Amino acid sequence: MRTESPGPESAPDHTEFVTTRAGHLLHTETFEPATPSASTPRTLLMIMGGNAPCFAFPSPLCRAIADAGHRVVRYDHRGAGYSSPVHHPAESYALDDLASDAAEVVEGLRLGAPVVYGISTGGAVAQLLALDHPERVSGLVLMATSPDYNVTPSLPPESGLPLPGPEWRSLVESLAASPPTVHAEVVESFLDAWRVCVGPETPFDEGHWRGLVERTLSLPGNPTPGAHQGPAVDAAPPRTERLAAVRVPTLVIHGGQDVVLPPEHGRALAAAIPDARLVEIPELGHMFTPEFAPRLAELLVEHLESTPAPTVS
């Protein structure tokens, strides 16, 4: 494990690389609480989706949770952000491998059993982490995700859950038919995807998303973000029946304007996990904007502080 000092514009208090048993270097960023919570201070592990870099979780959200007295850790999947690149398709992997990566982040950073917050594919990884490595998880927050979905928008979920909405299917089909070839076109295609993810009910701050896209495209070693994660998701079997084995407090957050995974996915997920709490937010799409960070921080802190601390053996 190698430790780095954050750059001048970095919000995290420190960054580290965790070396997995498979040989990947996973980049992690930690926000430490200035003052521990008056209740039991907890750790929140954030898992991003879509092979996006971990800084897609806005730093103000992470800092708000740290200011409430809890440690926040976000990390880059293999083949994303500053983590080791994946040479697709030679280095294909399964969704379970991403869950093992998450478990090794928990182990490598000595996080014990954090509350795990996953969004979209990060939420699928969080589900598998809780199922396959239950000793590494004390609670779950699953947002804009599902027990059964495919990244290929024309591939129906086995459990009968709905396909993505026409806005998302049309965008994916258009990009497949005419892939962008120059930087400006690539930027615009990413912006189109974020715009559809944010949804029609939330103002789209183009400056924020353009900055996120440009920063993502400037990352070294990962020129095709997302190209290799989709096959892992599509090959994964439904988790619906297995989720009955989850025994940790679970919060499911889903947007009423989610056209990537329509609201039925969040409802099915909450129904599959014993005693899960479902919070549906009518105006929310598949991805939240920075303006939503205070409301989301409130939900996350509430769940952190209501989740019993893991027993130390």
Image (tube, rainbow, N blue to C red):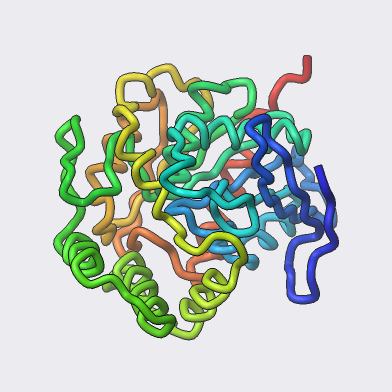
Residue in front for this viewpoint, 164 or 296: 164
**Quadrant where the N terminus is found in the figure:** top right
- Residue at horizontal 44%, vertical 48%? 88
Residue appearing at x 49%, y 85% in the figure? 207
Quarter of the rendering containing residue 258: bottom left
Front position in the image: 253 or 155: 155
Q: Is 153 situated above or below 42?
A: below
Return the residue found at the far front: 90
Count of marks overlaid on the render: 0
Q: Position of residue 83 (x, y in %)?
A: 63, 52
- Asked if residue 203 shows in the view, the reply is no
Q: Residue at x 67, y 30 (%)?
A: 21
Viewer-closest of 92 and 33: 92
Quarter of the picture containing the C terminus is top right
Above or below, 137 relative to 62: above
Please determine whether, in this image, residue 207 is positioned above or below residue 264. below
Report x, y in % for residue 251. 46, 39
Question: What residue appears at the point 68 percent right and 45 percent down from the top-left corner?
Answer: 25
Q: Where residue 184 sits: x, y (%)?
A: 41, 85
Farthest residue, direction top: 313
77 sits left or right of 89 in the view: right
- Asked whether, in this view, residue 248 is left or right of residue 238, the answer is right
Camera sees residue 223: yes
Residue 246 horizontal side relative to residue 43, left or right: left
* Percent position of residue 95, x then y: 44, 35
